[in-house]
Amino acid sequence: MNPIATMMFLTSLAIGTTITLSSHHWLLAWIGLEINTLALLPIMTKTPHPRAIEAATKYFLTQATASALMLFSCLINAMQTGEWDINTSSNLTTNSLSIAIMMKLGLAPMHFWLPEVLQGIPLMTGLILSTWQKIPPMILLLQISHSVNLNLTVIVGLTSVLIGGWGGIGQTQIRKIMAFSSIGHLGWIITILKLNPQLSLFNFILYVVMTTAMFLSVITLSTTKMSQISTSWTKNPALTTTIMLILLSLAGLPPLTGFPPKLLIIMELIKQNMLISASLIMLASLLTLFFYLRLTYIITLTLSPNTHNSTIWRTATKPSLVLTIINTMALTLLPLTPTILFT
């Protein structure tokens, strides 16, 4: 793709996100989401492969459906309240608005588009879809968190954690694994949204950091399958070890970055006397833990029989400074958790 065109589409992405984040008006927020969606479609199809075209078509249809439901809900809300302000929403439209935004995020049971779309696009575009494209809908959900239905958020959150673990168990493709990982993590975030929006935001920030670290690492190694990562040990042992630790961090094991948000969410649920929800979400997360541990085993404890037996490390890839910083953040932010929450 022409560099000028790429820069124009990336600028449109940034403008769309900025419009959504800075607006207090439902129509402006909707326009920002539409600019975001339309700017990503050409980036998805920059390699004219049938799978990329199929992924872009599925993404467009899903986002168009969610946008139509969102605009319809906004119009009904404006008729009910006489205002377009985001913080003013009627009980009639809050549920439909929440469902439309959750569909844009890819939460279960509106998640079917996400693994297929992510599998059909390049890794760098997958990084944008898994991180940048989640920011505007998530901020909108945080803005209306005071009026969302608690039962809806808890049911969708628990379902997403269960589907994220269940769907990821049999996967070997990194992009599909990251798609189900995204569904599971967003489930944790949504579960606590009504009770503690600040904790949801904290969890979302750490999710973006860990997902970015994982995608940048596999982009550096140019791998799309787990078996390719296991054979990359001889090319870059440090980065392969880091990927293993990032997977464990995504699983939420201490003392890595992924542990504090899960601990704080469980503590908040117990504080709100939601013991059954806390128990169910912990049991559902065991599925996620299983498939992350399985992937860790594949990466570090198995090697293909045709691997070169040379004892000399052949470092074919040199990690950049950005990758080093992001990977460090994805592994070592546990001691800084109180500071982040305070700020």
Image (cartoon, rainbow, N blue to C red):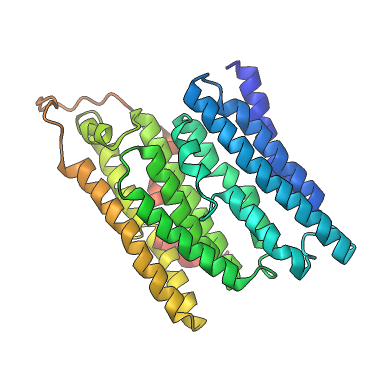
- Residue extending farthest bottom: 273
Q: Position of residue 95 (x, y in %)?
A: 68, 64
Q: Position of residue 94 (x, y in %)?
A: 71, 64
> In the picture, residue 83 is in which quadrant?
bottom right
Q: Decide if residue 331 is in sight here.
A: no
If the image is split into quadrants, where does the N terminus sit? top right
Residue displayed at 42% across by 38% down? 215
Q: Nearer the viewer, residue 284 or 338?
A: 284
53 shown above or below 13: above
Residue 258 shown left or right of residue 131 in the figure? left
- Residue extending farthest right: 82
**Total marks in image:** 0
> In the picture, residue 57 is in which quadrant?
top right
Q: Decide if residue 3 is in sight here.
A: yes
Residue displayed at 13% across by 24% down? 308
144 shown above or below 60: below
Q: Position of residue 159 (x, y in %)?
A: 47, 62
Q: Position of residue 225 (x, y in %)?
A: 31, 34
If the image is split into quadrants, where does the C terminus sit? bottom right
Residue 168 shown left or right of residue 7 in the figure? left
